[in-house]
Amino acid sequence: MLLIKNIGVLQTPAGSFAHRGPQQGENQKLHNAAVLVEDGSIRAITSDGALPEGAGRAETVLDAAGRLATPGLIDCHTHMVFGGYRQGEIPLKLQGAGYLDILRAGGGILDTVGKTRAATEEELFEKSMGFLGEMLSLGVTSVESKSGYGLDRENELKQLRVNKRLQEAHKMEVVSTFLGAHAIPPEYADRAEAYIDMLCTEVLPVVVEEKLAGFCDVFCETGVFDVPQSRKMLQEAQKLGLRVRIHADEIDEIGGAALAGELGAVSAEHLIATGERGMDAMAKAGVIADLLPGTSFYLGKTFAPAREMIARGIPVAIASDFNPGSCPSLNLQLAMCMGYLKYRMTPEEVLTAVTVNAACSLGLEARLGTLEEGKQADLVLWNAPDMEMLVYRFGSNLAGTVIKNGEVVKA
Ligand code: IZC
Ligand code: ZN
């Protein structure tokens, strides 16, 4: 047993459901708290200096020294398995080339596809293991990882096998998403439909058969996949038992958010350009908005209308979007700061966005996302006295002690 005592403030959302509207800002705050952990789970939580029953039998005692404790952060949107980097794009961007211009010219995602195809499974695995270590040290204890840089049967499966190996090899919880429809590969130039058909008949059945992903995603965007193509891919995935999510309205509002509502997607991601119709559909269907402020910053775009989404009852999650092009940062603390300043969310709303709502968007909410008795003991002791400090500082790593599944993984 592990006892963590002398926690200045233990702050957490409560419950295993997507928090919407006013619930987004409801956190429990326990002062002078203690947590007793047994077999990886939270056995008891107490406050006001009291110690849980059985605390005396704990073999390990950790003194939090008055620090803030929160659930481990959950990064519900990343493209973390990739070959190479794309630093060469920045001068083009600075000269005025847009994200979709670079993609149309064969760069962007397609540049990473070339480098990912050229990498071995082992190389991708080793590189991603490094990223997972970095994330854990930043207080992230669960992460989503998408494919989408293979764009053919062999290389999509290679990326997904890396996800599976990461989940087995690393302490991090890794949730795998099949994003074969991330771009149109050169072999299918101007034949998006034929590419979707190939994914549905030759790749998706293997993904399901080998349990390589629990989710299917599509990049629904101008010049990538339109709404009918995205619908086809996702409906096929739903038929085979996968849950679905959509890259929607990142650059242009072409109907991705509305499609998310229509299909009952778990989440829609980005939503920078989403308007009334998309938000209505999402609110009605209970679709979670996975917002990615680091990408708005890095692409020089506006920030998604988070306040309006909360007002309309859409549950909001915040993620890093870590990828080699539009957001080469895996620092979720930085995204939280942007959630505070750019989305104008409160510290409480931000915490909900990177814990329980992110857990719901990955289907992990029964086990992860809050600090409550019976939940898995994933928590962070921050070098900060409260959430206000955590979302105000930026650029530093304030994660002090990180505990994953009851084990201290960063002291
Ligand atoms: O590699 O550019 N938006 N996909 C859709 C991305 C960003 C990742 C990338
Ligand atoms: Zn993305």
Image (cartoon, rainbow, N blue to C red):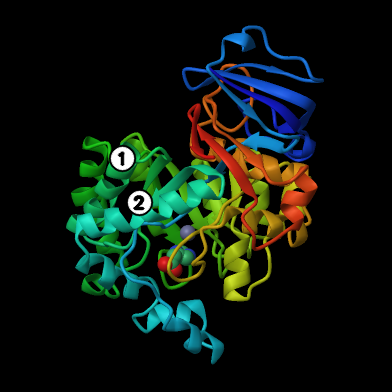
Task: Residue 5: name its quadrant.
Answer: top right
Kind of element beneath mark 2: helix
What percent of the width, then of the height, locates residue 162?
A: 27, 49
Kind of element beneath mark 1: helix
> What's the amino acid at mark 1?
Ala
Local packing at callout 1 (Cα closer than 10 Å; few below 14, some 14-19, many 20+) is few
Q: Which residue is at the front of the view, 171 or 196?
A: 171
What percent of the width, then of the height, locates residue 10?
A: 73, 31
Q: Are marks 2 and 1 in contact (CB under 8 Å)?
A: yes
**Residue 304 vs residue 346: left or right?**
left
Can residue 179 be seen by looking at this rendering? Answer: no
Determine the residue positioned at 43% across, 68% down.
Answer: 324
The residue identified by callout 2 is: 129
Determine the residue positioned at 48% across, 60% down.
Answer: 322
What percent of the width, then of the height, locates residue 80?
A: 40, 57
The answer for how far apart the CA atoms under marks 2 and 1 are is 9 Å
**Residue 278 vs residue 362: left or right?**
right
Local packing at callout 2 (Cα closer than 10 Å; few below 14, some 14-19, many 20+) is many
Can residue 295 be seen by looking at this rendering? Answer: yes
Determine the residue positioned at 62% across, 10% down.
Answer: 56
**Residue 82 vs residue 265: left or right?**
left
327 lies above or below 404? below
Q: Which mark is residue 347?
A: none
The residue identified by callout 1 is: 169
Q: Residue furthest bottom?
A: 95
